[in-house]
Image (cartoon, rainbow, N blue to C red):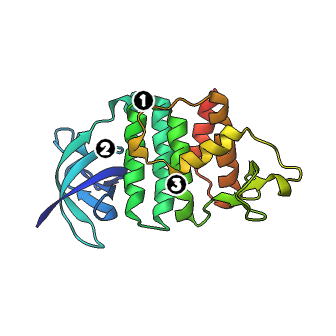
Amino acid sequence: MIKEVEGFIFKETPYGDTSKIINVFTKEYGLIGIMCKGAKNIKSKSRALTLRFTYAKFNIYYKEDKLSLFVSADVINPLKNINQDIVLISYLSYLVDLTQQVLKQSHEPSIYDNFINGVLKIEAGLDPLVITNILELKYLPFLGVGLNLDECVECGSKNNIATINADKGGFICANCLTDERIVDAKIIKMIRMYYLVKIESISALNIDSEIIKEINFFIDNYYDRYTGLYLKSKEFLKNLLTL
């Protein structure tokens, strides 16, 4: 029986002379492999529909725990803005790699919704760094290293939060403050907002550039300290942004 699934192509791998296998992150079944017979042929109608970063509804012969078979696809959004910008492509490459790591730990349906909504917001022109940081924060619980953004990580107090520290794993109140770097109160507020916001509800981002940089600095340090992830796409993105 042919089934229609919504999904996003994470990877394409050549198979033989004319075919390919695509790895698709689907709303219905998580990450699955799909055999696309003849899709490498220049004249094949499925060639353009089976490229990496295609977001579409796929008609497939679904086989659980095996390779499914591609029948056809209808593109939901061609992501023209992303595909025309090397910086945005680099952000998307990193988010795909990061999401694959998250899927090794969890198949919670919200991962798909957050990923797709994040991609669509970047496509719509919202700041890619902010959207990426929001996704990074939302992914932390699935990686087993969630942040405590409700209280001081030292004493549990919810009052007089003075700063946030990546090494200690969250908020520090004034009474527990030692030699931690003090950050602007707006940064503390915005990090919590990043974590709680529903990505699909974001229509505009009016955030000071220095606050964006500080939040990204914190998240980078937290990921380095607690996740153990090293992704080449992340390093490439960092290098690209420094050019």
> 1 above or below 203?
below
Residue position for label 2 = 54
Q: Quadrant of residue 31?
A: bottom left
Q: Which residue is mark 3?
A: 138
Q: Position of residue 64 (x, y in %)?
A: 26, 72
> Which is more foreground, mark 2 or mark 3?
3
x, y percent for residue 96: 45, 50
Q: Residue furthest right?
A: 179
Mark 1–mark 2 distance (CA, rounded to whole Å): 18 Å
Tell me the residue at 89%/50% (across/down): 179
Question: How busy is the neighbourhood of tag 1: few (under 14 within 10 Å), some, or many (20 plus)?
Answer: few
Taking the image as shown, residue 192 lies to the left or right of residue 25, namely right
What amino acid type is highlighted by mark number 2?
Thr
Residue density around tag 2, few if under 14, some if 14–19, many if 20 or more, within 10 Å: many
**Could you tell me which residue is drawn at 76 percent across and 51 percent down?**
160
Secondary element under disc 1, as helix, strand or loop, is loop
Question: Around disc 3, counting alpha carbons within 10 Å, would you say few (fewer than 14), some (14 to 19), or many (20 or more)?
Answer: many
Q: Quadrant of the C terminus?
A: top right
Quadrant of the drawing holding the N terminus: bottom left
For the residue pair 17 and 77, the one nearer the viewer reads as 77
Alpha carbons under labels 2 and 3: distance apart:
23 Å
Q: Secondary structure at mark 3?
A: helix
Residue denoted by label 1: 125
Q: Quadrant of residue 42?
A: top left
Q: Sequence-wise, which precedes: disc 2 or disc 3?
A: 2
Residue 86 shown left or right of residue 59 in the figure: right
Q: Label 3 amino acid?
A: Lys
Q: Is residue 82 above or below residue 143?
A: above
Q: Nearer the viewer, residue 90 or 119?
A: 119
At label 1, the amino acid type is Gly
